Image (spheres, grey):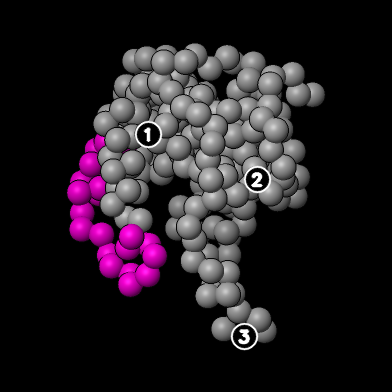
Amino acid sequence: MTTSKTLDLSIDELLTTTRSVRKRLDFEKPVPREVIMECLELALQAPTGSNAQGWQFVFVDDPEKKKALADIYRTSATPYLDMPKPERGDIRDQQIDAVMSSAKYLNLNMEKAPVFMIPCLEGRPDGAPAGMSASYWGSLLPAAWSFMLALRSRGLGSAWTTLHLIGDGEKQAADVLGIPFDEYAQGGLFPIAYTKGTDFKPAKRLPAEQLSHWNAW
């Protein structure tokens, strides 16, 4: 049951204005644990393969552990963000500078977020064929996105990051948090905070007609 204050958003507004929030994360405002758990309760209504519910969600608000995770993230994020970006010849080229500026800001300030969340799923898809990998992650990603939607509806934001999973980063993060690495895979690292303002707008995306195919490619 919803007990925290929610924004007056229609379903369409919620779906079209839930952004990856970086520069507008409010690092100064505390995030109550009960609000996080309320969002998680909603997220757990998401579908999961065979109703296995093999997920676990690790929340981190300890400053030293957040700093350790942020350093692991930066090991891969810093060189990645400094790489030249591809030119695609469409609207994405006009957006890339803003996206990179936002991502670099988060990279420098990650540990300032009041709370981190790492969603985990039982088993490991390492080396699995495409079909099995899709099936595996399909049991976690809907819940993670539902969690972000629930945050947005309560005036909080997050960003779905995955760069800490590169190389030895996932194992290092597991060691920091005591996650049983051989039994659970991590699906991302989500900084969580209230947002500076709640007036997010739909993003400029490629048109649906350009991305859709009917009956054949």
Q: Are marks 2 and 3 in contact (CB under 8 Å)?
A: no
Q: Distance between the residues labelled 1 and 3?
A: 41 Å
Q: In this view, does 156 lie above or below 9?
A: above
**80 vs 91: above or below:** above
The residue tagged 2 is 13
Q: Nearer the viewer, residue 44 or 211?
A: 211
Residue drawn where x is 47% and y is 42% of the image: 20
Task: Note whether 39 is above or below 137 in the view shown.
Answer: above
In the figure, is residue 155 to the left or right of 50?
A: left
Q: Position of residue 92 (x, y in %)?
A: 37, 62
Local secondary structure at mark 3: loop
Say what amino acid the circle numbered 2 marks. Answer: Glu
Mark 2 falls on what kind of element? helix
Q: Residue 81 at x, y = what percent?
A: 25, 47
Q: Can residue 172 be seen in this view?
A: no
Give the residue pinned by disc 1: 23
- Which residue sits at x=59%, y=34%? 152
Query: Quick check: marks 1 and 2 in contact, CB under 8 Å?
Result: no
Residue furthest to the right: 1
Q: Which of 15 and 148 is in front in this view?
A: 15
Instruction: Identify the disc placed on residue 147.
Output: none
The residue that label 3 is drawn on is 216
The quarter of the image holding the N terminus is top right
**Which amino acid is tagged 3?**
Ala
Indicate the quadrant containing the C terminus: top left, top right, bottom left or bottom right.
bottom right
Dot 2 or dot 3: first in sequence order is: 2
- Picture residue at 54% right of the left edge, 58% below the top: 133
Task: Give the magenta range.
Answer: 73-94
| Helix, strand or loop status at disc 1 | loop
